[in-house]
Amino acid sequence: MDNGNNNSDLSGFGTAFAIQTSITAGVLIVFSFFLRPFNKTIYEPRSLYAAESKKPPPLTRKPLSWFLTIRKTDTLNSVDKIGLDAVMFLRFIKFGIHFFLLATLFGLPLIFFHAFISPPPETVISSTGQQLDAKPDYSLTILTINNIHFNDVNQDPDFYNFFFVHSTLLWILSFWCYYNLYVVWNNYIELKARWFKSEDFVKAHHNKTLLVTGLPHYKTTEELENHFETLFGRKTYKDYFIGRESHKYTKLVEEHLKYTKMLEKSLITFLQSKNGKRPRHKEGGKYVDTIEFASEKINSLETSIYDLRVYGAKKLKRDCSAFVSFDSISSCHQAAKSLDNPNSTNGIFDKKNLNNLMGPNNLKKFVETRVKLCPDYEDIIWSNIGLSKAIINTRRLFTAALFIGLIFGWTFLVGFVTAITQVETFKHIPALYNFIETHQAATIFFSSILGPLLFATLNLLLPIILRYLTMLQGVKSYQGVEKSVLKKYFFFLIYQFFLTTGVTTLIFTYFTSFKINFNGAGQQTGLYYTLFMPIAAGFLKFSTTFVILASQSLTGYTMEIAQVFPLLLKIFYSKIFKLTPREEYELAQPPVFYYAVMYGLMCYIFVYATCYSLVAPFIVPFSLVVFTLAYYVMKYQLFYVYETRVETGGSWWPKVSKLILIGMFIFQIITTLVLAMKLWQVNFKNSRGPVIMSLITPFFTFIFWFYVKKNLHLPHKYVEEDFNEVKSNDADDSFDLEKEVYNPAVVKPLPKVWLPSELEAELPKYHVCKYSNLEDFLKQNNQKNYVIEDDFVDNSADTIFSDEKINQKEFEKVRLMDN
């Protein structure tokens, strides 16, 4: 390329950054002045719908009210408002700000150090004898470690001492990370101890319950109770309940809701239309009246559901799960702690102990049994908890095969996207390559706009695929699925990082000649010039793509606070479709915050930025800006917009802490390798000091990880044995375990047809419920002599959706307020 195109990466970066910054500023202005003050259902739903004790501080209609309010709100003292999970997420972002603040203070001088300490020679001689311009093809590399050249090592044999700067900074940043992690862990321990004493924790019965899976099929109750007594000690538990296979219930209830929505939609369309034409649709190859079809289906499904409910649990087959409750939270947690650590002195779940108690023939039954603290009952995936060990193993093999296939497919996709964003790839297509060579705008588009846009799209699709695979794998709770998605997502993003860097390096190596001769002193065609220099150059070249991705993150977070997609969705649905009250109610609910995706992306940015922080330090200031903007945006969203679906008491943090340490380990190894590649040019035996100094740091990461696990995580995972449990005001000592933990599909009242208030009087002309509830079903079918379990009797006809009608009225009031 000519000198004009040599600066294409700088021009591309400047253009992309200017565009993204302009969009970011514009969206923030529109949000602050026009969107938030006049649309509370979109931008402040928690101010309207959250419980009084959890409502955030009130905001005025002043443009900067949102920023000034969240800026002065104390995050660590807001657990009662947004939950410990949300507080720890914000604390994690604050950790990133603290880390990159120091990295920026060291990084800015390091940029000038790279640019001016040892510039390359003006010209070099290639292996063919041609004189070449020695300035880098990619101008941003003058700010990286690759710009430090050994023009004449013999004149300055101690030149390698300059690289002790990088080794020293590696040590400083590593210990700065350890210190900040230690501070966050202490915050977490203090907040979790406080959370253990909160009313929300104490009154939740699932905190006194253990979930047992992989349970063997026993023929008698005595055998089952012997199994529990072996696990938990002789009658230390209060009660137990064996899970039941309820897939049929779930399917029937889902179909009932489907046809209820169909009837609501068709009735509203028909009653509000002027032509009086009844809606029809194709069913089984012929057209049917939609209203009559849906009405008949609803009544038929209600008959089937009530016919099953009349027998309660007795008609359902036992599965491989059980719930075991205890008198107190401390006894439950101590039992879980004992089983979690088989080598502890009081560990019951110890192979030697079990062998003595039950004999070797029964040992396998206990080894396959899994015991954990029970998730929130609403969070349980009921179709997964009762799976046998054989089914789970089969599913895991199947999902492992799909996961491997996804890795291969992802490799192809990422490799393809990376390749088409490297201009050198098109050298085999002369016409296209010449066009790109002569048009700088085309170069900027391929290298600085198309690549980041395609990567952002791939990163949005990936969590959806991973969530499906994890559900198929047999994970027991929705939060468990999300945590598994976080690990897989992080793995894929790191894999993508190395893959894109590797593809860039291969292209760079293939199309670029490094067989050069400094000052004509003889051809340099050794391993350093043919392999190590291209690897280092390719790795550093891809750093510009990250900066553009970071600038896209700025735009992404402003789009997040502006709720662009929910706003467009609301406008689209309200203008194009006639929404039913149920659809309006669902659309108005506060959105759920997906921790897996947000943690995954933030951890990815953290790892990516730290890996380049010493070898390409111009990345670090951009990372600091991204984390700072993310902190204020996500703080606003978590206080005013998002709801945490299920509070886990900050259990995300130990997993995120581990990912941060993995990132630090990668950072230390990469920095050491880059230093080794640079020093290979000189006599490595005499210049290995900086490399050895850097190579020590990963061992400190392992030591710190072990310290965190042993001294900070495990001791505070469970409540202490002497935990003073203050009973909640509404605590119920006569709690029925079976009633609470049963699948909601079995006991939840069936939804009733919900029409707008002005059309409710017309409903009886087209649909009448055959049964108002289970009691009505019994009376109409003369089944008074059935033995019915009380927990299945549904005496409320409209329990769920009468509340929804109230919410619908509230929603209409809020809509008037917004207008």
Image: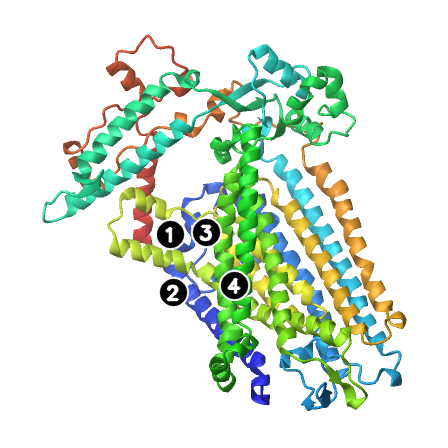
Disc 4 and disc 2: Cα gap in Å?
A: 32 Å
Disc 1 and disc 4: Cα gap in Å?
A: 32 Å
Give the residue at mark 2: 34
Give the residue at mark 3: 641
Earlier-in-chain disc, 2 versus 1: 2
Earlier-in-chain disc, 2 versus 3: 2
Residue drawn at point x = 48 percent, y = 76 percent: 445
Give the residue at mark 1: 41
Tag 4, which secondary structure?
A: helix
Q: Nearer the viewer, residue 508 or 621?
A: 508
Earlier-in-chain disc, 4 versus 2: 2
Disc 2 and disc 3: Cα gap in Å?
A: 17 Å
Tag 1, which secondary structure?
A: helix
Residue drawn at point x = 72 percent, y = 23 percent: 348
Mark 2 belongs to which amino acid? Phe
Where 191 falls versus 168 (above or below)?
above
Labelled disc at residue 455: 4
Earlier-in-chain disc, 3 versus 4: 4
- In this rendering, position of residue 569 left or right of residue 491: left
